[in-house]
Image (cartoon, rainbow, N blue to C red):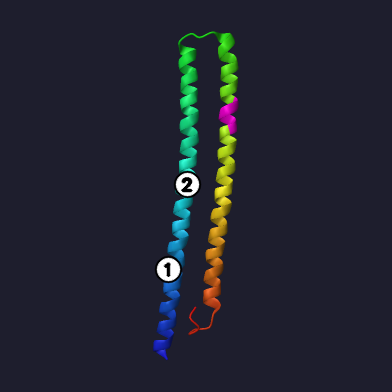
Amino acid sequence: MSDNASDTLHSASQQFSGLAMRANRVLLETAETALGLQLGQLQHSAAATGQFLDALGKGGDPAQLLPQGLQLAQDNLERLGKTGHQLMDLGLRSGQSLAELARSGVDAASKPPGTGG
């Protein structure tokens, strides 16, 4: 009888560790993608802003630089908003993946022992 309980505990432990590893993988992939999105947005905005500041430092015509500066600000804000939407979508997809993992873990745990679950 204790062998049966030990086998059941061992099986449950293996299922739990497998689910935990898959959940960690989902979270790490999500964090990696989110960081990549944010760094890409920051790099693009910093490069464009640097070019504008370079033109400003060279004493360009203020009448031309003001519209360029406003356009730059608009582009940076649009890029920031797009990145925010992508991050929200990524978070939702990650949450759905984690919910599916949790659901599969609950389904597997609710099966009677010895049914292949």
Mark 1 neighbour density, 10 Å: few (under 14) some (14–19) many (20 or more): few
Q: Is residue 21 above or below residue 69?
A: below
- The three-letter code of the residue at mark 1 reads Ser
Q: Secondary structure at mark 1?
A: helix
Q: Is residue 51 above or below residue 117?
A: above
Q: Is residue 42 magenta?
A: no
Between 86 and 31, the one lying in front of the other is: 86
Q: Is residue 11 left or right of residue 82?
A: left
Residue 33, disc: 2
- The three-letter code of the residue at mark 2 reads Thr
- Residue topped by disc 1: 17
Query: Residue at image x 56%, y 54%?
Result: 93
Q: Position of residue 117 (x, y in %)?
A: 49, 78
Q: Quadrant of the N terminus?
A: bottom left
What are the residue bounds of the magenta stretch? Answer: 74-78
Q: Position of residue 85 (x, y in %)?
A: 59, 42
Disc with the residue nearer the chain's start (1 vs 2): 1
Q: Position of residue 106 (x, y in %)?
A: 55, 72
Q: Secondary structure at mark 2?
A: helix
Q: Quadrant for residue 10, please give it.
A: bottom left
Tag in front: 1 or 2: 2
Query: Residue at image x 47%, y 36%?
Result: 40
